Image (cartoon, helix red, strand yellow):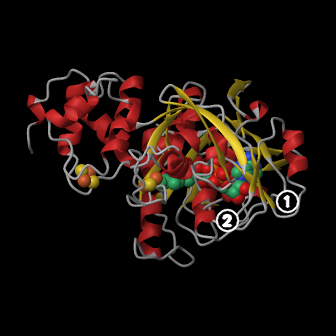
Amino acid sequence: MYSFEVDKPDSVDAAVSALQVEDAQALGGGQTLIPTLKQRLASPSRLVSLTGIAEMKGVSSADGVVTIGGGTPHATVAAEAASAYPALAALAGNIGDPAVRNRGTIGGSLANNDPAACYPSAALASGATIVTNAREIAADDYFQGMFTTALDEGEVITSVRFPVPDAANYQKFEQPASRFALVGVFVARFADGVRVAVTGASEDGVFRWSEAEAALSDNFAPEAIDGLSLSGDGMISDLHGSGDYRAHITKVMTQRAVRAAG
Amino acid sequence: MVDVTMTVNGVSKSGAVEGRTLLSAFLRDGLGLTGTHVGCDTSQCGACVVHVNGQAVKSCTMFAVEADGATVDTIEGQAAADGSLNTIQQAFQDHHGLQCGFCTPGMVMSAAALLRDNPKPSEAEIRDYLEGNLCRCTGYHNIVKAIMAASGQDVAAIAAE
Ligand SMILES: Cc1cc2nc3c(=O)[nH]c(=O)nc-3n(C[C@H](O)[C@H](O)[C@H](O)COP(=O)(O)OP(=O)(O)OC[C@H]3O[C@@H](n4cnc5c(N)ncnc54)[C@H](O)[C@@H]3O)c2cc1C
Ligand code: FES
Ligand code: FES
């Protein structure tokens, strides 16, 4: 790692001003950023740690919306969102391994937008709102391709608001070496329709599978998408699976998620 | 350099660290607590697992400055002062839960975190919890057995597969 200083502000305002320094970067749980720094793929002059900011932590729920502080670790979401939004809690409880879940945060995951990360699919399928120090961003506008988001330089995710669906489920086809999703599908059924978000599969990062959404909105049953097929074009193709394989697994995971959501 | 102070295995310890000093490096090089092993240094293997404020974390993926003011527990704090092993350590010995022993500090610390939250885990729960702890020797079977035994459960049923 190159050398840097670490700031530990205790409020969002202090963090935002600390991030104004040239080449400063936010540090969440560090579960992605620290490995990146070790590889010298990033060289910030200063890291601004968000983990000591109490106002960015915790899970609350009111009026059918679950709000999660941007600095909340995955393990806390798994425990504290379990009754209000079980599918989201289950997703959080299956990220990586216990030690990763004790440190890694939802804000870090959404800011990073790894094409194989779990949370982006939950945010997109739930129609979540990403709240930053400066504005509110709809999930549909937030994800802009692999590792790319609507966030501006120095912008901090302070919380994420998830409308709670009537039924939902996340199915992760795990890549056992990385513990990320080879393909993950989050299905959410709301009164006004079904949303299906797919992670791990596309070269453009998380995406909504609109044909499946339409079919499932008419009939929320696994057979409803029997006739659909996704193309392997534009799907990630690597030694773990070809694009066609990922396309196939996407459909299987979607059907499993629908069955499990019931 | 900044000064950090943390309570390590019940004793207050201070030292000067750089921003980039990992907690694993501070424990090993700064405090001489080399029981915490660094296997991969890439967050994969879990040999470096310690408890920070009671939670299992990979000390190779946390900065020492982030643990300033925290309570840190490492493998060195597990045995009693007279050197007698704690229940989990003794079970690892009794059930042959280690071979080379490189992964063992992380395994014991992860097991301790698991048993605190879930005092009677099933075999499946133990295997799931150890997802982030890699062992290149044992094939995990005797580790799982040791943890079941440490939680007071009958291990006859999971005799060698
Ligand atoms: C072994 C292992 C297995 C994993 N498995 C999975 C998995 O199965 N599924 C999965 O989804 N993820 C997985 N991860 C990734 C993990 O979830 C990370 O915790 C997460 O991607 C990053 O969160 P973090 O808080 O650690 O962020 P950091 O690593 O601290 O930061 C990541 C990026 O986000 C920025 N950032 C951090 N917080 C904020 C914020 N609040 N606002 C704005 N920007 C911010 C940082 O500047 C940095 O660019 C795994 C990681 C490891 C090491
Ligand atoms: S040394 Fe920390 S996870 Fe391997
Ligand atoms: S005993 Fe050798 S790595 Fe586990």
Marked residue chain, label 1: A
**Which quadrant of the view contains residue B148?**
top left
Residue type of the residue flagged with mark 1: Asp
Q: How many marks?
A: 2
Q: Are marks 1 and 2 on the same chain?
A: yes
Q: Earlier in the sequence, mark 1 or mark 2?
A: 2
Determine the residue positioned at 43% across, 48% down.
B48
Q: Which residue is mark 1?
A: A152
At which x and y percent is residue B121?
30, 27
| A146, above or below B136, in the image | below
Question: In the image, residue A180 lies at what x, y percent?
Answer: 48, 57
- Identify residue type, mark 2: Phe
Residue A113 shows which numbered tag?
none
Specify whether residue A11 is in view.
yes
Question: Helix, strand or loop at disc 1?
Answer: loop
Picture quarter containing residue B130?
top left
Element type at mark 2: loop
Of the four image quadrants, the one with ligand 2 is: bottom left
Q: Relative to residue B109, is residue A7 depicted above or below?
A: below
Quarter of the image with the C terminus of chain B is top left
Graded by Cα atoms within 10 Å as few (under 14), some (14 to 19) or many (20 or more), the crowding at tag 1 reads few
Q: Which residue is mark 2?
A: A147
